[in-house]
Structures are given as structure tokens and as C-alpha cells.
């Protein structure tokens, strides 16, 4: 089950090129996705798109977790935590990268 902020990231990324504040500041979906792909050590393409999108959404959840008013469970061993879900996404990205080599 995803949080509302998690889903907002997906909606924002999908519509980023249509949102004036992002356009004015030169922020595009392509730039964001490529930057995250580079950080993860993968190439942004059709095969990695969904996982990179998920990694960004979990990054945002984790960012909110640093602020006490948005406190959530980050325990990477608790299956219900955003920390655990983020760990799974990163493991899938690493496995996919390994398979591409």
C-alpha cells in the first residue's frame, strides 16, 4: 500500500513536462529520470523506467520521514515500512543491471 505522497511523485513525474513551474526552471522528466538512473548505476530505458520511478517515489517518502511531522516506519526489515519497500526496489534494480551485463 503506497502513501499519498508516494503516488504524488508518480503523478508529478508523469505530468512534469506540462507543469509551468518545472518548465520555467528547466526541470523535465527526462532530466530527473536520467539523474536517478545515473545515481543507481543503470541506464534509463523501457526496462528500468518503472523501477527508477519507484525509487524516486520511495526517496520522497524517505525525505518526508526525516521531518518529524511526516514520521513513518523506515525499518528495512519490517515488510510494512517504506524502508523495506525501498530496499526491494533497489535490489530489483541491481538484479536487472546484473542481467543486462
Image (spheres, rainbow, N blue to C red):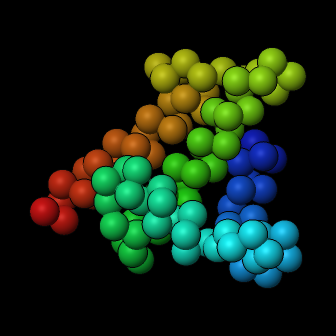
Residue 14 visible at all:
no
Taking the spot 75% from the left edge, 42% from the top edge, the residue there is: 3
The quarter in which the N terminus is drawn is: top right
Residue 61 visible at all:
yes
Q: Is residue 1 left or right of residue 90?
A: right
Q: Is residue 21 left or right of residue 58?
A: right
Along the viewing direction, whichever of 99 and 33 lies nearer the viewer: 33
Q: Residue furthest left?
A: 101
Total of numbered circles in the picture? 0
Relative vertical location of residue 49 with respect to residue 52 in this rendering, above or below: below
Where residue 4 appears, as percent x and y from the top left, is 81, 47
Q: Is residue 18 left or right of residue 2?
A: right
Q: Is residue 61 left or right of residue 41?
A: right
The quarter in which the C terminus is drawn is: bottom left
Where residue 26 appears, as percent x and y from the top left, is 69, 73
Where residue 37 appears, as percent x and y from the top left, is 41, 59
Relative vertical location of residue 73 with respect to residue 100 in this rendering, above or below: above
Taking the spot 67% from the left edge, 69% from the top edge, the residue there is: 27
Along the viewing direction, whichever of 67 and 2 lies nearer the viewer: 67
Along the viewing direction, whichever of 21 and 71 lies nearer the viewer: 21
Taking the spot 75% from the left edge, 65% from the top edge, the residue there is: 12
Q: Residue furthest front?
A: 25
Taking the spot 33% from the left edge, 67% from the top edge, the residue there is: 43
Where residue 83 appears, as percent x and y from the top left, is 55, 29
Amino acid at each position: 500500500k503506497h502513501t499519498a505522497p508516494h503516488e504524488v511523485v508518480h503523478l508529478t513525474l508523469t505530468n512534469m513536462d506540462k507543469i509551468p513551474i518545472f518548465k520555467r526552471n528547466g526541470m523535465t522528466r527526462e532530466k530527473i529520470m536520467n539523474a536517478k538512473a545515473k545515481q543507481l548505476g543503470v541506464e534509463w530505458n523501457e526496462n528500468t523506467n518503472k523501477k527508477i520511478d519507484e525509487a524516486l517515489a520511495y526517496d520522497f517518502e524517505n525525505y518526508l520521514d526525516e521531518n518529524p511531522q511526516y514520521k513513518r516506519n523506515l525499518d528495512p526489515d519490517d515488510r510494512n515500512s517504506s524502508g523495506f519497500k525501498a530496499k526491494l526496489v533497489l535490489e530489483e534494480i541491481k538484479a536487472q543491471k546484473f542481467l543486462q551485463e
